[in-house]
């Protein structure tokens, strides 16, 4: 870590530089100047990580220097060395982000190692917190975008992935994201959904799953014509007719839509084209049949509408990353 020492007392400045065992804790003094104004000039042309500064200096004092640097050098950290022992000065310095506040009056040479060790630890803790904030921000944005997409309603794998990701954020963050998602669904359905006050992310996700399951349980019984219910009915329609030669025009007719509008809306709601979604469900059905072990692969392919076994193998391999035979063999090994 590169250090700049700022103090209008030259003896104090040089004394601090000479008494500290900087290298032991990974510090390097790259400069020393007599006031805040000179410090700002130095910072324009030099990389600095930590500034050890006095408070009472001419032109620009230590507190004003910190305030100026908050905007110009937001990653720069400060350690205050001052004759002021008034708590108000320490409080203001800490509020501005100082890593430490050390009294010159009570300072003892024997404290040097302890001070540098403490500053080093706090500096690194700050870096870790910053990295976590950046990671959390990226994760939060990804989660917000994914939950605002209705794909999770129609894709169990996507729902599982989002639940796993949601478990990595704070309770209140998860709550805000889920409330926003439900509000989006509410705008589509015209119905009101209120996420209850729950004490854990897992409880919230369990409530959302219950809502999702209820949607599928009631979608065939309701006459509601909004897209959330309509496409839930289509998902069930695909599952029930997965062994048939499913066509988008037939599915569109099930919910009273034109083929072109249905195709566009299906992709918006599920994140996939109707054709690709059907293939995915057929391959999932094939995998389930293989796991049961009651039919051979040729029969499974035929049941699902694939008379060409080699084409079926190609499609299955693309979906699962292995051939049907390899998948069936893995299932057998796992069951032994």
Image (cartoon, rainbow, N blue to C red):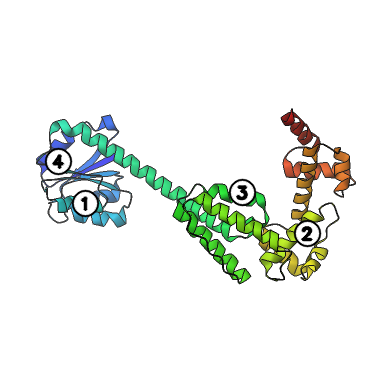
What residue is at 52 percent from the left and 51 percent from the top? Answer: 203
Residue 37 visible in the snapshot: no
The tag earlier along the polypeptide, 1 or 3, is: 1
Q: Position of residue 182 (x, y in %)?
A: 56, 63
Q: Is residue 115 above or below residue 232?
A: above
Mark 3 lies on a secondary structure that is helix
Bin the neighbour count of mark 3 within 10 Å (Cα to Cα): few under 14, some 14-19, many 20 and up.
some
Query: Dots 1 and 2: beta carbons under 8 Å?
Result: no
- The disc at residue 93 is 1
Residue depicted at 22% across the width and 50% down the height = 39
Task: Report the label total.
Answer: 4
Contact flag, marks 3 and 4 (Cβ < 8 Å): no
For this view, does 120 lie left or right of residue 193? Answer: left
Q: CA distance from mark 2 to mark 4?
A: 79 Å
Residue 318: where, in percent of width, then height? 75, 44
Q: Separation of disc 4 and disc 1 at Cα?
A: 20 Å
Please name the residue that numbered disc 4 is placed on.
13
- What is the secondary structure assignment of the residue under circle 1? helix
Element carrying mark 2: helix
* Mark carried by residue 237: 2
Which quarter of the figure has residue 99?
top left
10 Å crowding of disc 1: few (<14), some (14-19), many (20+): many
Whether residues under marks 2 and 4 lie with C-beta atoms below 8 angstroms apart, the answer is no
Q: Residues within 10 Å of mark 4 (few under 14, many from 20)?
A: some
For marks 1 and 2 on the same chain, the one whose residue lies earlier in the sequence: 1
Indicate whether 262 appears above or below 316. below
Alpha-carbon span between mark 3 and mark 4: 59 Å
Q: Position of residue 295 (x, y in %)?
A: 86, 39
For the residues labelled 3 and 2, the Cα–Cα distance comes to 22 Å
Taking the view exactly as shown, the residue that stands out farthest to the top is: 336
Give the number of the mark in front: 1 or 3. Answer: 3
Residue 160, numbered label? 3
């Amino acid at each position: 870590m590169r250090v700049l020492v700022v103090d209008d007392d030259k003896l104090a400045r040089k004394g601090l530089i000479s008494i500290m065992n900087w290298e032991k804790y990974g510090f390097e003094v790259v400069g020393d100047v007599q006031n805040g104004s000179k410090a700002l000039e130095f910072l324009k042309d030099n990389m600095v990580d930590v500034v050890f500064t006095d408070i009472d200096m001419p032109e620009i004092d230590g507190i004003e220097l910190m305030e100026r640097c908050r905007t110009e050098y937001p990653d720069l950290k400060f350690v205050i060395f001052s004759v002021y022992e008034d708590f108000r000065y320490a409080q203001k310095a800490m509020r501005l982000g100082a890593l430490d506040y050390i009294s010159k009056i009570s300072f003892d040479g024997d404290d040097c190692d302890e001070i540098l060790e403490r500053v080093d630890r706090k500096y690194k803790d700050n870096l870790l917190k910053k990295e976590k904030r950046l990671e959390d921000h990226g994760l939060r944005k990804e989660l917000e975008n994914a939950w605002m997409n209705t794909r999770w309603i129609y894709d169990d794998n996507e729902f599982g992935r989002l639940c796993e990701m949601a478990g990595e954020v704070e309770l209140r963050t998860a709550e805000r994201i889920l409330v926003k998602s439900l509000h989006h669904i509410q705008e589509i359905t015209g119905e009101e959904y209120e996420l209850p006050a729950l004490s854990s992310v897992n409880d919230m996700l369990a409530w959302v799953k219950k809502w999702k399951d209820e949607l599928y349980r009631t979608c065939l019984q309701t006459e509601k014509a909004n897209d959330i219910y309509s496409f839930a009915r289509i998902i069930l329609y695909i599952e029930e007719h997965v062994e048939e030669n499913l066509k988008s025009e037939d599915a569109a007719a099930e919910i009273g839509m034109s083929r072109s509008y249905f195709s566009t809306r299906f992709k918006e709601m599920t994140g996939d084209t109707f054709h690709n979604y059907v293939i995915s469900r057929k391959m999932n059905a094939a995998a389930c049949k293989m796991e049961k072990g009651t039919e051979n692969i040729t029969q499974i392919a035929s049941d699902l509408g694939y008379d060409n076994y080699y084409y079926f193998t190609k499609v299955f391999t693309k979906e699962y990353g292995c051939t049907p035979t390899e998948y069936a063999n893995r299932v057998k090994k796992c069951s032994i």
